[in-house]
Image (spheres, rainbow, N blue to C red):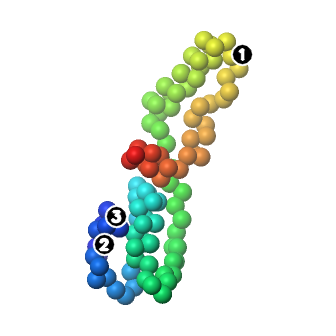
Amino acid sequence: MLRVNGAGELPDDLSGVIGVTAGASAPDSIVSEVIERLSPRRGVRTVVATEEDEYFPPPPELRELLRAIAAAVAVFCDIPEPPGDPVARDREVHAATVLEGVGG
């Protein structure tokens, strides 16, 4: 078993069947780079065992703060009816997207 943090850490002498696994915190871009680097000249066969639907909900305190800010904005901007719960659609944002944004 070999653990790497990116394609640049792969040794040049790998051969045979190679399996790649990655956790939910691994950015998709790094996983793709590792697979691309491993791709042999005659092709690579990709087998997907599972697809993850990772979801990291914001802490309850942050969810309540976001709701309070939305309510305050509605009051101060004289909006008769707020547009809805600001955290109701947080599941639509994938963790990999957030992590890539944080990493720069």
Q: Residue 46, how many percent across, how many down?
A: 51, 77
Amino acid at pointer 2: Leu
Which label number is shown at residue 80? 1
User: Between residues 28 and 93, which one lies in front from this camera angle?
Assistant: 28
Is residue 66 positioned above or below 25 on the image? above
Residue at image mark 2: 10
Label 1, secondary structure: give it.
loop
Residue contact at pointers 1 and 2, CB within 8 angstroms: no
Q: CA distance from mark 1 to mark 2?
A: 58 Å
Which label number is shown at residue 6? 3
User: Between residues 60 and 14, which one lies in front from this camera angle?
Assistant: 14
Query: Which-is-in-front pick, marks 1 and 2?
Result: 2
Amino acid at pointer 3: Gly
Is residue 71 positioned above or below 4 on the image? above
Horizontally, is 21 left or right of 65 in the view?
left
Q: Residue furthest right?
A: 80
* Residue at left offset 45%, top offset 45%: 101
Q: Residue 56, how many percent across, how many down?
A: 47, 46
Query: Which-is-in-front pick, marks 3 and 1?
Result: 3
Label 3, secondary structure: give it.
loop
Is residue 96 positioned above or below 76 on the image? below
Of the residues under marks 3 and 1, which one precedes in the sequence?
3
Q: Residue 87, how many percent across, how many down?
A: 57, 35
Q: Quadrant of residue 15?
A: bottom left
Horizontally, is 6 left or right of 67 in the view?
left
Label 2, secondary structure: give it.
loop
Horizontally, is 74 left or right of 13 in the view?
right
Few, some or many C-alpha atoms within 10 Å of disc 1 (few <14, some 14-19, many ≥20)?
A: few
Amino acid at pointer 1: Pro
Few, some or many C-alpha atoms within 10 Å of disc 2 (few <14, some 14-19, many ≥20)?
A: some
Of the residues under marks 1 and 2, which one precedes in the sequence?
2
Q: CA distance from mark 2 to mark 3?
A: 8 Å
